[in-house]
Image (cartoon, grey):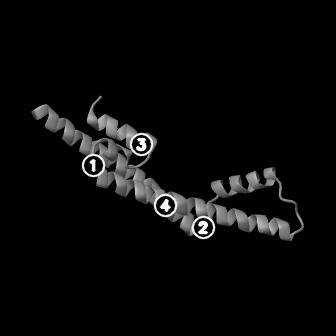
Amino acid sequence: MSNALKGILFSALIFPGAGQIILTKYRRGAGFLCVASVSGLVFVAALVRQAVERLQEVVAQGGVVTVPEVMKILTELSTYVSSVLMILSFLVLFCCWLFSVVDAWRVGTELDRKSADV
């Protein structure tokens, strides 16, 4: 398997930055990994914050919070993104993933070319 394909698969299917790490570009991989992790955590935190607000509304109206009610609220929130922070963090995560895949392909191609030249 070529380095380019290995890098693409690791970055695309495992986590952004994994392809760079497997291709021994540790700083690049750590950078992608950190950016993707932080943006993912911000997205989840914003989602949880909105879910808690909705659950507090249900309790304030005298409703009972059940597991199906929580799942319904989370499903609604995940399909309808209402927070600017959630949109931005998702876009950062998506762009990080995309750039990680392209960079892993580029690094892998360079390594494949160097190994073919030697």
Q: Secondary structure at mark 3?
A: helix
Q: Relative to residue 4, is residue 84 depicted above or below?
A: below
Please report whichever mark, 4 or 2, sits nearer to the chain's N-terminal start: 4
Say which residue label 3 marks. Answer: 12
Q: Secondary structure at mark 2?
A: loop
Please report whichever mark, 4 or 1, sits nearer to the chain's N-terminal start: 1
User: How packed is label 4: few (under 14 Cα within 10 Å), some, or many (20 or more)?
Assistant: many
Q: How many marks?
A: 4
| Image depth: mark 3 or mark 1 in front | 1
Say which residue label 2 marks. Answer: 83
Q: Where is the N terminus found, in terms of image quarters?
A: top left
The disc labelled 3 sits on which kind of residue? Ala
Spatial distance from mark 4 to mark 1, Cα to Cα?
21 Å
Percent from the top left, x then y, of residue 56?
Answer: 78, 68
Q: Which mark is residue 25?
A: 1
User: Is 38 situated left or right of 28 in this image?
Assistant: right
| Image depth: mark 4 or mark 2 in front | 4
Q: Which mark is residue 39?
A: 4
Q: Secondary structure at mark 1?
A: loop
Spatial distance from mark 4 to mark 3, Cα to Cα?
17 Å
Specify the quadrant of the image occupied by residue 47. Answer: bottom right
The disc labelled 4 sits on which kind of residue? Ser
Q: Residue furthest right?
A: 62
